[in-house]
Image (cartoon, grey):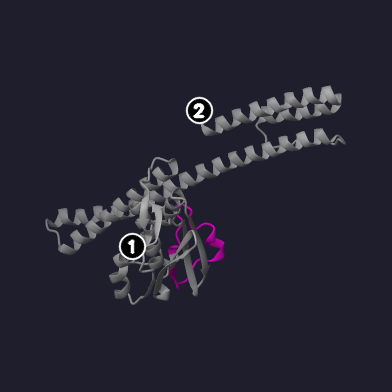
Amino acid sequence: MTKEAIILLFSILVAALVAVIIIQYAVYRFGTQKKLRSVSNQLNNITETDGDERITLFTDNKELKRLISEINELQDKLIKVKTDYVRSEISSRKMLSNISHDIKTPMTVILGYLEIMRINGTATEEMIQKTENKAKSVMELITQFFTLAKLESGDMNLETERTDVCEICRESILDYYEILTNSGFTVKVDIPETAVFINADKKALQRILTNLISNAIRYGSDGKYLGISLVREDKEITICVTDKGKGIDKQFADKIFDRLFTLEDSRNKNIQGNGLGLTIAKNLTEQMGGALTLESEPYKQTKFILKFRALP
């Protein structure tokens, strides 16, 4: 049985049960037969047609008004569940379509180079390198896709432990230090020398920071600046990854963590993105009890903010 069928069945059962309660209660207390028939007919219409209508009834009886209001609130919640389900289905189809496109593009390049090698009978070092790079990009996309699928289905178990988040931050920025300096970036690191501990999965935390830093390089390259800071305040730690590039316009701010959302016009040629990194980062953060948010003022400062509960 599909989720939509389950929702529909649940809606019918609940609506029918509420209808019986209303009828019995009102007959016993108020004897308003005509109004009860109106409510009953409207409920029958909703359950038979799976409609999204609300029950309307003009009455001075406060108890009956309250019950009708509760039915309508329940109907609103069911409508939201159905709407979210449809939106999720559309998003999934779009994601599969986009991933198919993103896989097809590098695979076409790979097959092209292989065909050249077959015809010429030789392979230059440049061809081999380009073919290898494209193959790696396909593997990375597939890996990220399955990671996200596991996260969203609840099949990924994170092994959390007492973790020095300062050490993870330093390691993460060092992985990109050569790329940043060679690209003329100013790098500012503000991380305490003393250890700060949180309850986290080390690999998951590294992946979150890697995704945020690579995203800042990709979309913030115009500003030639990348900063990472860590601050502890009482029982909470805040990690900020900051760039001073073109930023993210307000109209896109609520979409930036959506699956496969990318700002194509600002994509850096040296570090490609596939629109899954930030979604994975947010999912991993929330699974470890943290929060990931965005603050952006285009061409001034774009900041991704991680918050976790600090350990003693």
Give the percent coordinates (x, y) of residue 91: 49, 47
Q: Is residue 246 magenta?
A: yes
Which residue is at 76% across, 34% downward?
67
Residue at numbered disc 1: 167
Give the image location of residue 210, x and y in percent. Answer: 36, 60
Q: Is residue 152 at least partly visible in the picture?
A: yes
Does residue 276 appear anywhere in the picture? no
Please give the range of residues in magenta: 242-264
Q: Main secondary structure of the magenta part?
A: loop
- Which residue is drawn at the image coordinates 56% and 43% (left, top)? 84
Q: Nearer the viewer, residue 41 or 231?
A: 231
Q: In the image, residue 21 lies at what x, y percent? A: 74, 25
Instruction: Identify the amino acid type marked 1.
Output: Glu
Disc nearer the start of the sequence (2/1): 2
Which residue is most to the front? Answer: 312
For label 2, the residue is 1
Residue 76 place in picture, x, y as percent: 67, 40
